[in-house]
Structures are given as C-alpha cells and as structure tokens.
Image (spheres, rainbow, N blue to C red):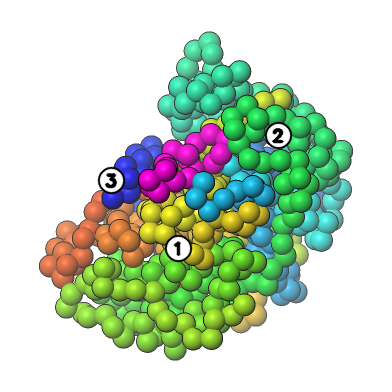
Amino acid sequence: MQKTTKHLVNVRIAAILFTVIVSSGCATGQLGKHNSDEFKNGMVVSAHPEASEVGIEILKKGGNAVDAAVAVQFALAVVYPNAGNIGGGGFMVYRSAAGEVNALDFREKAAGSATRDMYLDTAGNPIVTKSLYGHLAAGVPGSVDGMVEAHKKYGKLSWAEVLQPAINLAQNGFKITQRQAGELNGLHRKLMEFNPNGTAFVNLESTWKADDLLIQKELANTLRLIKEKGRAGFYEGAVADSIVGEMKRGNGLITKEDLKNYHSAWRKPITGSYRGYKIITMPPTSSGGIALVQLLQSVEPFPLNKWGHNADSTVQVIVEAERRVYADRATHLGDPDFYPVPQTGLLDAAYNKNRMSTFDWNAATPSSKLLAGQIKGAEHEETTHFSIVDRQGNAVSITTTLNGSYGSLVAVKGAGFLLNNEMDDFSVKPGAPNMYGLVGGEANSISPNKRMLSSMTPTIVEKDGKLFMVVGTPGGSTIITSVFQTIVNVIDFNMSMQGAVAAKKFHHQWLPDEVAVEKDALDSTTVEKLRKKGYNIIQRGPIGRVDAILKTKWGYYQGGADPRGDDKAIGY
Ligand code: DON
C-alpha cells in the first residue's frame, strides 16, 4: 500500500508539472458552415508544433496519412523525447477513405530471458525502482518495426522521404519549449545518474531555457541508418550493438536475438457501436479498445445529455461503469498471444448492461466488494498521441510511448535515443499496483517474449459509414477514460472538438477506490452530493493530453489540440 501511495504521488507530481491553461471549453460544435480554424484537405494534431509541421508538409507534398504518421512518429522521437520514440512502442488504428480498417500492434516485448518474478526481492515483494528505471526496465522496442510495417503496407512516398525531416531536426537541432526546458532541468541529476558518459539531454554548461537549440547528432546518425537499411538499421548492426552494449553496462536483458526476433503484429480492430456511431479501436495487447467499448455500452442506456456534462448523475453512472470495467481489465486482459482474453464475452452489450444492474443510486459500490465479471466461454505519465487525416480522407490514430516521462532514463550510448520502461506495465506480482496504480494477475504476468498490457486507446469513430472522429491520448490508466469522455463530450454534449478535448475530466479505475478529478471539473454542490453517497473524491493534476480531429457535417476538419500541453493542430 505504501508503494501504491508513493507511485501515485509520483504520478501526481509529474502530472502537476503540466501547466493548466484551460477553461472548461464547452463550446458547441458545428454551428457555422465553416470556421477559420477548420480545413478541407487534411489535418495533423500532435504533441509538438514541429512534429505537426512535419506531418502537414508530408501531406502537402502528396503523402498520405500513413506517410505523414511515419514522419510524425520519427519527428516526435527527436522533438518530444519524453514520449516520442524509437526506443519504445505503440499502437496504430487505421481507416482508409474507402472504409477499410486495420490495427497495428508495435508494443514492446519482454526479453527472451525475462522471468515472472524478476522484479521481486527474496521475500517476494516488488522492488519498485527495478521495473521503472534503468536497463532492466526496458522491453524490446517496437516502434521502428511498426513504422516499417505501416509504411510497407500503406505508404506512398519513399521511406527516405518520410525519414528525412526527423534526421534534419536531430542534425540541425530544434528549439525546445519552456515546458521541455523545465522538464530537462528537473531531470538533470537522474539523467546524469543513468548516463554517466553524458547524453544530449543534459546541459553541462548551464540550465536549459526556452528556445535553446537541442542538437542530437547520435540520434541523427541512428535515423540515417534506419533510412538506409530499414528495420535492419535498428534491429541489427551498429545500433543493435549499441543497445546490447548498454544492456551489458547496466545489467539489462535485451540481446541481439531479441532485437532480431522482434516483429509487430497486424490485428483486427475492435468495433462497437454507441448511439448510432461506429467505434473502431485497438484490440489487445492494449486493454484500451475493449474497455472503451465496455464503457460506452455501460452508459448507453442512461440519458447523459438530459443530466448534463459533469452533473452528479452523469458522474455517478460513469464512475460506476469505470469501476466495473477496470475490475474486468485487471483479471481478464493480457497479451492475446499468451493468454485467452475473453474478448467476445467482454464486448457483449447484455453482459455490460447486466454489470451495471448492481449499482445503487443511493450509495457508491465499494470496489472492495466488486470483483471482475464471470465471462462464459473464454476464448483461446509519458505517452503521446497523434491524429492525422489526409486529402483523400484516410485516417491514422497512433498512440506511442516510452511509458514514464523519458522512459527508463537510459539513453543508448552511441545511438542517442532513450529506452522505454514499459516492463512496469506488466503485473510484477498479482495485486501489486504499477506506477499508475493498476493491478493485474495471471493474464498480465511476465513471460519471455510476451507483450505487457497497455491502456493506449487510439480510436476512430464513424457516422453513417463515413469518417467522424480520430482520437487518442496519453495518461497511463486515465487514457481509456479520457478517450471515453472526449467521445461522450462530442456525441452526448454536442461540444466542438477543441471543447471536448479541453473540458475538465475525471477518472476512476476500480482500485484505488477513488474518483480523481481535475481542478474545477466538478462544482462544489456536485462534489458534496457525491461525497454523501460515499464517493471518495480527490483532486489531481491534469488528466490526459487528447489530440483529436472531428469531421463536421459540412465536410471540414476541426482540430482538438490539448491545451494541457504544447500540442498543436495544423490543417490545410
Ligand atoms: O501502455 C500504457 O498503458 C502506458 N505505458 C502508457 C503510459 C502513459 O500514457 C504515460 N503518459 N502519461
């Protein structure tokens, strides 16, 4: 319990580092035919203005949404090193203009020599720092293979063309934002500890300031090798040697074999419906898609629109749905290549409706009294999200991460990129919370070559068979509930894309049994009413950093760039 608290405090401190410059943003959406910030030809929304620029330039020169996505992923690895990455992994949901859908799982994997109890001490207790910092925290990276696969299947421009903008940014440098300067200064001591031989992220001469140029020569070289050799430029040769060299230095597990054997997986997206809209989202190894559809099914019978945004009844129904869905997540979800996830059962609308039948309007359901549902017929704080739509109407939704901000804090010497600390997303011991307070069991236990369960929820929404929304966010365990609230904000509360993204959010995840709310998300009367019913309401820092695109009924794209960060929507 002590560890949970410590973890949550850490997460909250990290969250508080984000500046909130947000009003509740409940502006309604599609009033006029066309506002000046709506665009006809395409749009990119990402966590960093430089990365959004890279994406829009690719679209303007005739690249499609996947070309732009690959370019943005690599650009974010340079200009947003806290989460953009080549040393991590992620998920992509794709919808072509013609309506073909696909999903790509480029989540990291445990090394071949990983063991179930590798983060426990001799008494069987988790050693929290071991799965969070340093070499042992890293899973085998998936992002480069993912981008190679996505480009091979859907790309139109050459591989070299989509790599070049990131190479330029790394080689010539880019101006860091105020926020980034603060983060890098805050991490100075830790980065020195894990990188005694220095890294581009450490400023040895003075402190970082806004607009300082961050030049990453080693990373530029690594990106050049990837440009020339494709996946072999990363998973073999000099870069693989550097990764394995790092592992030797810091007692990590990743071997040349692990790197060579890493392959991302094309998967069938999860689909569901909500008030006549079609939801296309990420299947396991992320829990996000299943949980999102479960949440939508759970609240669909209730008149949220009549009650109002963040009104007490709305909050109560959503919290009770979240409690039930996260209890299911803890028991039933894990890597489908290793564990028989009962997907059909969890996505059954009748099952989710029935789960909601046990809640009591007069009192909160204590999480301690609520277990995961019985499913019949079981079948065999830092991430980043970006959303892209191109001129033809193809759409890409990608969430990608190193897990914690700046991952394991280990930058691969000679190769210039940060390694993830994704191993913490496994359940290191049944019931022991990870850095987001999430618990798990057998389904998400550590095994060699297994993928750790994720909450990332890149999603695309259709209306009447046509593209409607592209959405996703970082935020660890809050990802699912933030994507859920953003969709509900548009569909039930008729908000604009920007309004839905900016609107204040709240979150419940079964355990710990608390409703975490952003400042001013709920008014004092609502808080009072909910507290009387037994809801433990706590205030926390910003929730999520949603980057989304909405297609208006007039055929224009509206961006939603989260004001909780430096995020930027650019259209043309
Ligand atoms: O895959 C996951 O669910 C987590 N590793 C995501 C981490 C994250 O969103 C951190 N960002 N704030």
Q: Is residue 447 in the magenta section?
A: no
Identified at 38% across, 45% down, the residue is 123
Badge 2: residue crowd in 10 Å (few <14, some 14–19, many ≥20) = many
Q: Name the residue under label 2.
A: 244
Instruction: Mark 1: give few (<14), some (14-19) or many (20+) Cα within 10 Å.
Output: many
**Residue 323 pos. (x, y %):** 34, 69
* Disc 3: which residue: 2
Near-viewer residue (254 or 234)? 254
Name the spot of residue 545 as percent of width and height, x first.
Answer: 47, 50
Q: Quadrant of residue 372?
A: bottom left
Using the numbered discs, state the Cα–Cα distance from disc 1 to disc 3 in whole angstroms: 20 Å
Amino acid at pointer 2:
Val
Dot 1 or dot 3, earlier in sequence: 3
- Looking at this rendering, what residue extends furthest in the top direction? 205
Element type at mark 1: loop
Residue that protrudes farthest toward the front in the picture: 122
* Disc on the earlier residue, 3 or 2: 3
**Amino acid under label 1?**
Gly
Q: Earlier in the sequence, mark 1 or mark 2?
A: 2
| Residue at which label 1 appears | 441
Is 355 situated above or below 337?
below
Asked if the residues shown at circle 3 and circle 2 are in contact, with their CB atoms under 8 angstroms apart, the answer is: no
**Label 1 to label 2: alpha-carbon separation:** 30 Å
**Which residue sits at x=45%, y=63%?**
441
The residue nearer to you, when weighing 410 against 352, is 410
Relative to residue 182, is residue 110 depicted above or below?
below
CA separation, marks 3 and 2?
A: 35 Å
